[in-house]
Amino acid sequence: MKTTLLGHPRIGRQRELKKACEAFWSGKINQTELLNTAKEIKKQNWLQQQDLGVDLIPSNDFSFYDQVLDACLTFGCIPKRYNNIDKSNYLELYFAMARGLQKDNIDVTAMEMTKWFDTNYHYIVPEFEKEQTFHFFSNKIIEEYKEALTLGIKTKPVLIGPVTFLLQGKEKESGFHRLDLLDKLLPVYFEVIERLENLGAEYIQFDEPCLALNLSEKEQQAITKTYNKIAKKFPALKVFLANYFDCYGENLNIALQLPVDTLHLDLVRCPLQLNDILESEHFNPKTKLSLGVVDGRNIWKNDFETSIKIIEKASKKLDPENLWIASSCSLLHTPYDLDLETTLEPEIKQWLAFTKQKIEEIVALKHLLKADNDGYLHLFEENKLANLTKKSSKLIHNDSVKTRISNLKSSDSHRESTFSTRQVLQKQALHLPLFPTTTIGSFPQTKEVRSWRLKFKKGILSQQEYNTLIAKEIEDSIRFQEEIGLDVLVHGEFERNDMVEYFGEKLNGFAFSSYGWVQSYGSRCVKPPILFGDVSRENPMTVKWSEYAQSLTDIPVKGMLTGPVTILQWSFVRNDQPRDVTCNQIALAIRDEVTDLEKAGLKIIQIDEPAIREGLPLREEEWKNYLNWAVKAFRISASGVQNQTQIHTHMCYSEFNDIIASISDMDADVITIETSRSEMELLDVFVDFKYPNEIGPGVYDIHSPRVPSLEEIENLLTKAKNVLPKEHIWVNPDCGLKTRDWPETKDALKNLVTAAKNLRSQT
Ligand code: GLN
Ligand code: ZN
C-alpha cells in the first residue's frame, strides 16, 4: 500500500503567500521577491511531505491565486480583453485576469469568481467564446515538476480535468455549448502530458469533481471520450482520476469502465460507495483504488479504527499493491499545522488534525496496516484514546441541550398565526408608512472602530472604555438615521468583528484557533470557528446593545442576529452527529436570543441567513432533505415570538430559482435580498412564485463606493412597484454597509429615503 495527497495548502504556514502577494500588488516588493517566497513555500511543502513519508507527492497544487486560473493560462484560454497586456509579463497578465488592471492606457475588469463546488473556496470562472481556441501557453505545470525534481522528488502533477474545466466555465456568447470545445481543448492536454512524460513523469492526477454532480448523458460521454483518448495516446501514463466532495453516484459505471490507472474515492463524504465498487460487475481488479479516508474538508482527527476497517475491506478484494491511502480531497481546505496553536484548550486540541497532522495520519495508517506494525501501535492507541474521550467529554456533551432537542415539538417551528393575521397586527403595532425604509444592519466598520476592538483585545482599552466608545458610535448612528428619516433603524453592529465569529465567541460549543487559516480566494483567508460541542447560550448575546439603541429613540430599532444555517455553514462543524442536529442546537440558542430581544422591547428582529443557498448539496436528490432541515432550523429560531413581533431575514446572493419554495416556507415576515445589480430581474423569481410575505429588494449595490442617484433608485423602485403588491414592498440597500465609508453611505441613504418618499406621494 502507498500513500498520496490530492493537494497541499499553499498559503504558507504563516500566510507568507498572502503577505507577499499583497506586498507585490502594492509595489512594496518586486517580482523576484514574490517568486522567491513562492519557491520557498513549495519547497517547504514538498520536503515536509517527504520527511513525513508520503510516497507520491503532488505538484502544480501551488498557485499564486487559483488553480483554475492557472489552468486557463496553461491552455491559453485568455479572454480578448486582456490582449493589450504584454504577454511576456506573465504575472501582470495573471493578476490582471484575477483582479483587473488599471495602468497607463489599460483598464480591464477581472474575471468572474464563484464558489468551488460546495466549498467556501472561490475559483476564477473560465470564459469561452464560440470560436474559442486553445494553445499551450503557460508552462507552470512543467516548471513546477522540474522544481521538485531538483529536490530529488518525482511528483504527481495535478491538473484540473478537461471536462470539469469546461463545465465549471461559462459561455460568453450564445450559439454553442462549452462541451463542444472538448475536441479543441484535448490536443493541448496531450501536449502537456507529452512534456511531462518526457521529463519522466509517471503519474498525472486529473481532478474531475464534476463526477460528483448529476451529469447528463452528453457530459458522461465527454468523460469516457477524454480518458479513452488519453489512454490510447499515452499507454504508459498512469492516470490518477480524482473525484471528490461526493459519491460517483450514477456516474459510477462510467467511471469504473475508464482505462485509468487509479480511481480516487472520497470515502469521507461517501463511505458506502466502496461496497458498490467492490461488488460491481464493471470493476476491473487491475484498476487501483485511492481510498480518501482522511478528511480534507474538516479538522477532526481521523478515526483509525474505522479507516482501517475500510481499507481492510478493500484489501480483501484487491492486491494491497493496488491501493493508495489518501486525503479525501485536496488539503487546501484545511489549515496548515496544529502545532502552531498554543492557546487552544488541550482537551479540544487532542481531537484535531490540521494538514501536517493529516499527512501523519495517512502515513500512520499505511504502517498500521502492515503485518509488522509494532513500531506504530502506540499511534493507534493514542488515536483510539483521543476519539474515546470525545464520546464522553463534558466539554462536548450537555444533557440539557440534548433533552431540549429531543423534546422539540412541531409547534416550536410554527408562529402562533399565519402571515396574514400577523401582518395586520404588525401594521397596528409598528405604524410604518407605505414603502418603509431600512438598512441591512451594519454601518461602516471604520479604521477607528476596528482599532478600538484591537486595543480592547490587547488590554490597552478597558471593557468600560471600549463600551463607552461603542455606545457613542451607536448613538451617533441612531441620530443620523433619525435625521435622514429612515423608518426602521439599526444599531450598526460596531461591536462585531464578524457575523459568525461574534456569536461563536459567546456560545458554548465553539473554539477558536489562532492560525487556522484557509484560503477563501486569492490572498483572502478565513479562520472558521471550530464547532466542537453541544451548542448552548449562557447569557444574552446582543440584547444589551440593541436595547440601548432602542432606548435612544421612539422609532423602531431592529434587533440583529445571524441565523443557525449561516453559523453552521461558516464553521468547521463536529462530525460526531448529523449536521441537522447541530443546526437545531444553534437554532434553539438563537431562539432564546430572539425572545429575549422581544422582552427587551425590540419589535422587529432580523435573522440573517446569507448562507442557506451555498449549503445545498451537490446532488439534487439530496436537496429536499437539506432544505427541509435548514428551513426548519430557521423557523425554530424565529417562532418563539408573538404575532405582532416582526421577523426579518436577509440573503445576499443571486440564485433563488432552486430554492424559492423553501425561502417562502421560512415564513419570515419580511425578507431583504440583493437585486440592484440585476436591475430587479432577480425579483422575477419571487413574483412568479407569488411570494406571499413582505419583501425588500435591494435598491443599491453596496460593493462599490459609488453613490446611486435618486433617479436610479426611483427607477428600480418603480419596477418593483409594478410587479409586487405595494403594501409588501420595503426599501433598503442590497446588503450591510460595513465595508463602506461614511460619506458615501450618508449620501446614498439620503437618496434612498427621498426616493421612497417620492414614491409614497405618487400613490
Ligand atoms: N447584518 C449583516 C450586515 O449588515 C448582514 C451581512 C450579510 O448579509 N453577509 O453586515
Ligand atoms: Zn447581505
Image: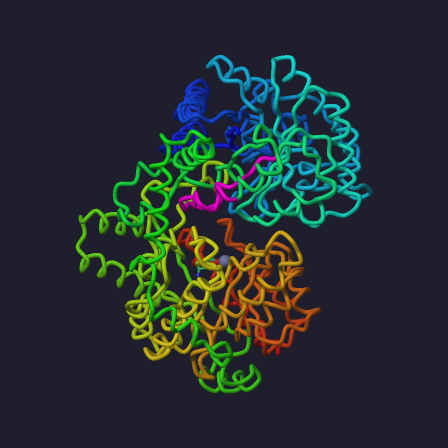
Which residue range is magenta in the image? Answer: 289-309
Q: Who's the residue at 37% across and 49% down the image?
A: 387
Expressed as whole percent of the image width and height from the top left, the position of residue 678 reads: 64, 55
**Which quadrant of the figure has residue 26?**
top left
Q: Is residue 274 left or right of residue 337?
A: right
Q: Is residue 655 left or right of residue 358?
A: right
Which one is nearer the viewer's eye here, 756 or 653? 653
Q: Which colour scheme appears in the figure?
A: rainbow
**Height in image: 321 above or below 410?**
above
**Height in image: 166 above or below 63?**
below
**Which quadrant of the figure has residue 354?**
top left
Most extreme residue toward the right, as rendered?
A: 175
Locate the C terminus and report the quarter of the image it occupies: bottom right
The answer, for residue 596, to whether it is visible in the render is: yes
Which one is nearer the viewer's eye here, 637 or 446? 637
Expressed as whole percent of the image width and height from the top left, the position of residue 515 reads: 34, 40
Expressed as whole percent of the image width and height from the top left, the position of residue 400 reads: 33, 71
Indicate whether residue 299 is drawn in magenta: yes
Most extreme residue toward the front, as rendered?
A: 371
Number of numbered discs present? 0
Indicate whether residue 67 is drawn in magenta: no
Expressed as whole percent of the image width and height from the top left, the position of residue 273 reads: 62, 47
Q: Is residue 600 left or right of residue 219?
A: left
Q: Is residue 344 left or right of residue 352?
A: left
The answer, for residue 440, to whether it is visible in the render is: no
Q: Who's the residue at 41% across and 28% down the image?
A: 20
Which one is nearer the viewer's eye here, 533 or 454? 533
Which one is nearer the viewer's eye here, 86 or 708? 86
**Height in image: 549 above or below 615?**
below
Q: Who's the residue at 57% across and 84% down the image?
A: 420
Judged from the image, the quadrant occupied by ligand 1 is bottom left
